[in-house]
Amino acid sequence: MKIHWGKSLATAFGLFVLGILALVVFAVSQDVDLVTEHAYERGLGYQKQIGILQRTAALQHRLELRISETDLVVTFPLDSGGRPAGTIRLYRPADRSRDLVIPADPDSSGIQVVPTGALDRGLWRIKVAWEQNGNAYYSEQPIMLY
């Protein structure tokens, strides 16, 4: 039995088209996690963020993060006086659905303890935004939970 070259060419082209269609269906069905939902709006206000980062860098003491076996200890700088208020965002780069936002509520010595027992092991980015005496501050640090 002899196969005509035209049928072979049509079969090869058909398989190529089916492969491309399968690739498109696969690519469209993938879940894409963005770093932030509103990247454009955040980009417009980034000059304000630069000012906040400069003010944070000018503090005499830095925000400190310490990890124990069961807790994350956040020590706020008390340079500018007043009690810090804001948020502690635990950002999980591998899975956005695991992110947590905790209100910053340190004690009088500027220390807040966040339990880490329920958190997945691996890389987390701790993003702390706080305000003291009408000034905004921001610090971001990566941590590894083992």
Image (cartoon, grey):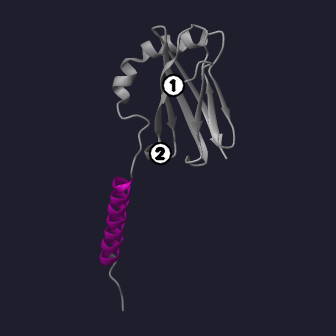
Specify the quadrant of the image occupied by residue 143. top right
Question: Closer to the N terminus: mark 1 or mark 2?
Answer: 2
Instruction: Return the residue nearer the eye: 2 or 82.
Output: 82
- Within the magenta stretch, is there residue 112? no
Q: Is residue 30 above or below residue 58?
A: below
| Horizontal side of residue 102 vs 80, given as left or right | left
Name the kind of residue labelled 1 in the image: Asp
Q: Which residue is mark 1?
A: 105
Q: Point out residue 1 in the picture as x, y percentages from the top left corner.
A: 36, 92
Left/right placement of residue 7 relative to residue 107 reads: left
Indicate the position of residue 62 as horizontal and vertical percent values: 64, 17
Residue drawn at 32 percent across, 61 percent down: 21
Segment colored magenta: 6-30
Mark 2 residue crowding within 10 angstroms, few (<14) / some (14–19) / many (20+): few
Q: Position of residue 94 (x, y in %)?
A: 52, 46
Amino acid type assigned to the residue bearing label 2 in the image:
Arg
Nearest to the observer: residue 70 or residue 137:
70
Residue of label 2 = 98
